[in-house]
Amino acid sequence: MENIGFGVKRIASTRWEEEGLEEAHDRGVGQKVSSPRHVSCVQQAELSADGSCIMTSDYDRTASVYILSDQNTALFFKASLKCPEPIWALTSYPYFTTSDPDTSLILLSTRANFISLHDISSQASIYNKICAYNNIDPLNETLRVPHSLLFTSSGTTFLAGSQNLISLYDINDSSAPVSAFRTHSKDDPQGYRGIVSALSISTDGILAAGTWTRYVGLYDAEGSGAAITTISLPGGPTWLPRDSRDQDNDNALRGNGVSQLQWSPCGRYIYVAERMSDVLLLYDIRNMSLGLAHCKSRNARTKQKLGFQVWSGRAGEDIFTLDHEVWAGGVDGMVRVWRDPHLRAGGLEADDVVRVGEDPVVGTMLNREGTCLVAASGRLDAVFPGEEDEGEGRGRLSRHGRVRERGAVDVFSLQGVES
């Protein structure tokens, strides 16, 4: 174990050669390997609903699954899927349980391929698909490859966000989407164009959809109902500042497209993260025309998608609780924590800062109890001619030798975290 201060201790990591791996393999938990496994630059990470599995996609076009031990004291490589094309989106089943093969499912969207469903309970390779969902546009016979995927609360359907379109699929019907609606039409004053890059559903069933063009749209009935409203983010294409001071402030809040959306446990507030932005925007859905506040100094000015999590210790017991925290990673290897930002206004500095490494923190995930923090990181460095032999220990050269990349998944114990 490695004590890194601030009541946080690193207890497991893909950086280390796992102890007890052979024993785990004998129990059917992990794969037996003879040497440490290289982890590529992580691009997306997700913690399963039961808190037992970590799913990642990386620069090397691989989806990987890691198992946390019962006491969260060890991390085992479980399975992987090497894809021929880049992975654009990944999500896990909302009732995921490692012990139940019927629920240990993940969805993948890769460039130039159908959406695929995989069972990760099998050993080592999860290459075989349970199902491949048709996402061909019937009008022009081109693939509509999703940049975002999300299961609905029932677990029987899922949403896929692509260019100007959100599609709803039945998990048991691979022939075509059950329904689909365009985010832009001539007759819809609230319409907007762009790739739907982020999806999130509130406890009240409101679907939020964000785009690379910096719009956020809200829809009733988990996307099956009517459009509620659409907003353009500060400095966006249709944003109208009230005066010159607002315009200067909005420019400071401007990002380069929505990378993640997440609701508060009560479903009243929504947080918006963008690429190339140091802030997390906070809106109250009762008045979406004005931002309530913004969590600033995140240190996230990068084209990488740096994830965040809204966490509440009482969310599992009381979905109406307002108390919550926001945990977000930065490019400096830090995770910053804002406590109850919905109770304040304006620009909010982090209440706490925790160092989890040296590389950009792509995924920041807490378990339900708040006793365990999982941080996934990824780094890409350009390599210029003549520098191929430099930087040993800082990652692996890509196939073309132009990029040196590395990644990691680290697990930390948290002491004294309160909701």
Image (cartoon, rainbow, N blue to C red):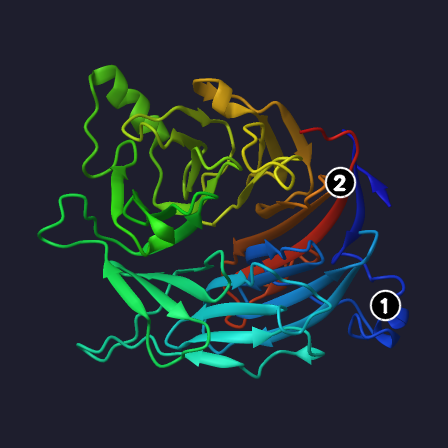
Q: Please name the residue shown 49% across and 69% down the image.
A: 108
Residue 71 x %, y %: 84, 52
Quick check: 144 left or right of 395?
left
User: Which quadrant of the view contains residue 368?
Assistant: top right
Residue situated in front as seen by the camera: 254 or 405: 254
Instruction: State the residue position of label 1.
Output: 21
Q: Please name the residue shown 31% across and 31% down the image.
A: 288
- The quadrant of the picture occupied by the C terminus is top right
User: Which quadrant of the view contains residue 417?
Assistant: top right
Quick check: 203 left or right of 256?
right
Q: Disc 1 to disc 2, how far (Cα)? A: 23 Å
Check if mark 1's residue and mark 2's residue have beta carbons within 8 Å.
no
Q: Amino acid at mark 1?
A: Leu
**Secondary element type, mark 1:** helix
Pick whichever of labels 1 and 2 is earlier in the sequence. Answer: 1
Nearer to us of marks 1 and 2 is: 2
Instruction: State the residue position of label 2.
Output: 371
Residue 85 x %, y %: 45, 74
Quick check: 191 left or right of 222?
left
User: Which quadrant of the view contains residue 111?
Assistant: bottom left
Q: Amino acid at mark 2?
A: Thr
Residue 217 x %, y %: 29, 45
- Eyeballing the image, is 173 above or below 46? below
Q: Please name the residue shown 43% across and 36% down the image.
A: 270
* Structural crowding at the residue carrying mark 1, measured as other residues with C-alpha within 10 Å and reported as few (<14), some (14–19) or many (≥20): many
Q: Is residue 387 visible?
A: no
Residue situated in front as seen by the camera: 199 or 304: 199
Q: Is residue 15 visible?
A: yes
* Structural crowding at the residue carrying mark 2, measured as other residues with C-alpha within 10 Å and reported as few (<14), some (14–19) or many (≥20): some
Quick check: 121 left or right of 205?
right
Q: Please name the residue shown 30% across and 75% down the image.
A: 143
Number of the label disc, if any, that sits on residue 73: none
